[in-house]
Image (cartoon, rainbow, N blue to C red):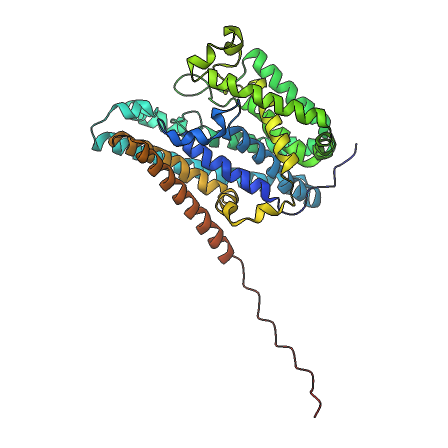
Amino acid sequence: MKTIRNIPKGRDLRLDLFRGVANWAIYLDHIPNNAVNWITTRNYGFSDAADLFVFISGYTASFVYARMMIQRGFIVGVTRLFKRVWQLYVAHVLLFVIYVAAIGWVALRYSDPDIIHEFNIAGIVENPIETMTQGLLLRFKPLNLDVLPLYIVLMACFGPVLWLLLRWPNLTMTGSLALYVMARQHGWNLSAYPTGVWYFNPFCWQLLFVFGAWIALAGIREVRVAARLTPLLWLAALYLIFALPMTLAGRFPAVGALFPAWLVETFNPNDKTNLAPYRFLHFMALAFLVTRFIRKDWAGLKWIGFDPLIKSGQQSLQVFCVGIFLSFAAHFVLMMSAGTIWSQIGVSVAGLAIMTAVAYYGNWSKRQDKPLLPPQPAQPRPPTAN
């Protein structure tokens, strides 16, 4: 048994940048009938912002808590993990209550009962006590509130997985892959309330989370070696090119008619619930090319134009929660207005601006919590010659 000791050091701004990209894309993608969300990656390939969010979450969780587990022991590491899980759970409950209350108020104020069905909160009206209880148990989830419960469950189970990753990383990664295959083969998933299963199957999506952790702790050497292999670069690029028309074929029948029906039906509809293999491979290819050409020390990461995204990534939880609520507000504004292209651009830009403001405030507030360094005593001047 060989314990990993070379935990990544220093902040990787690429993680903050792309986590910010994920938060912005999730906000835009959650606004129906919004032309602006055509700028997000979900329209041009099999994977989307959710895949990026889960992968980065696994990557960051590993090097934050792995170092703590090595230096201070398993118990301390696990308790710190559960402290984070509690923060995530409290954020989810707060968002859940505000989200449901806002949707209910809109439905009552504007006499639009259909909206409670559209956002999957009809159970609150019909059976409020049981529905709220199931919401606290993460089994009842209104529309667009699926990612955070997945994150909570993955983090809650991550302690033993991290312990194994630190000792047998490749074996643990193999076990994660085996669980993914078995879950897809036998239909394993968690039940939802009142019917159905989780939209993000945690038995399948754990693969992306553990893969991120494995890359951070053990797989980075393999990635660096692979990045120098030109055939792999071409293979990844060709797969991304192939995914483009297959994705567009699912959105535009005219594009689908250009290809054999069996080929289009293989990739459409995109199996997001169980993290289809072609979806996972698409994310791997995309991440492989991005990390190949955007290195950790790339000077462009300090460009001021990336700062809003980086700040949004550094305050990911707050920005994510605000973005979920704002996506409902934007949807409602578009419903109440003519829904013109200018309205779509307006709500998109306004929402991103508010999320950015929250991120900057969060960074500023965090700095204020740090104790000020005591003033340094003035150095005596050297005597001057007369």
Q: Relative to 200, is 334 on the left or the right?
A: left
Q: Residue at x 76, y 36 (%)?
A: 3
Q: Tell how many labels.
A: 0
Q: Please indicate whether residue 136 sits to the left or right of residue 274 in the image.
A: left
Residue 162 appears in the picture as rendered: no
Residue nearer the viewer, 79 or 373: 373
Residue 350 pos. (x, y %): 36, 41
Quarter of the C terminus within the rendering: bottom right
Of 69 and 206, which appears nearest the observer?
206
Residue 109 image-quadrant placement:
top left
Q: Quadrant of residue 333?
A: top left
Q: Which residue: 43% across, 18% down?
A: 251
Residue furthest right as drawn: 1
Q: Quadrant of the N terminus?
A: top right
Camera sees residue 386: yes
Q: Is residue 260 left or right of residue 290?
A: left
Horizontal relation, residue 236 to residue 305: left or right = right
Seen at 39% across and 44% down, the residue is 354
Above/below status of 75 relative to 180: below
Q: Position of residue 92 (x, y in %)?
A: 43, 35
Q: Is residue 187 above or below residue 287?
A: above
